[in-house]
């Protein structure tokens, strides 16, 4: 029988103001694993934010088109989380775009 080797304890990452990678606020633990590359061209960042926000909008619009939907509260809670994750990711990318635009010379 083999024994599993556990990962070493993690050191919490403290973000540096000039850090190229920004952790998504939707990470589910203190040790982030999903990041935004803040040096990506603005049009690519805009496409990423647009894709996520429009996907959520499409799902919600489809839900509005239906008649009454009967389901348990835990299903609605799961559905809300399903929509909130890409929406929060899109907002995080928009934050990066805003910071980059504000830093441009006028």
Image (cartoon, rainbow, N blue to C red):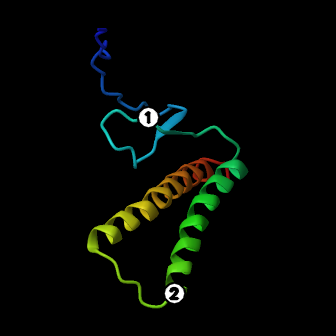
Q: Position of residue 104 (x, y in %)?
A: 65, 48
Disc sitting over residue 73 in the figure: none
Q: Quadrant of the N terminus?
A: top left
The residue located at (59%, 52%) in the rendering is: 97
The residue located at (41%, 84%) in the rendering is: 69
Q: Position of residue 83 (x, y in %)?
A: 45, 64
Mark 2 vs mark 1, foreground winner is 2
User: Compared with residue 77, is residue 70 higher up or lower down, i.e. above or below?
Assistant: below
User: Compared with residue 7, is residue 103 higher up or lower down, i.e. above or below?
Assistant: below
Total marks placed:
2
Mark 1 highlights which residue?
A: 33
Mark 2 highlights which residue?
A: 66
Q: Residues within 10 Å of mark 2 (few under 14, many from 20)?
A: few
**Residue 80 vs residue 21, the one in the foreground:** 80
Is 73 left or right of 59, judged from the image as shown? left
Q: Residues within 10 Å of mark 1 (few under 14, many from 20)?
A: few
The residue located at (28%, 67%) in the rendering is: 74
């Amino acid at each position: 029988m083999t024994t599993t080797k556990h990962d070493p304890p993690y050191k919490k990452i403290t973000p540096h103001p000039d850090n190229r990678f920004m952790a998504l606020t939707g990470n589910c633990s203190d040790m982030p694993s999903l990041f935004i590359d803040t040096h990506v061209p603005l049009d690519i960042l805009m496409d990423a934010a647009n894709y996520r926000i429009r996907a959520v909008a499409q799902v919600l619009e489809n839900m509005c088109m239906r008649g009454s939907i009967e389901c348990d509260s835990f299903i609605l809670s799961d559905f809300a989380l399903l929509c909130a994750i890409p929406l929060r990711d899109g907002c995080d990318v928009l934050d990066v775009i805003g910071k980059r635009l504000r830093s441009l010379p006028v």
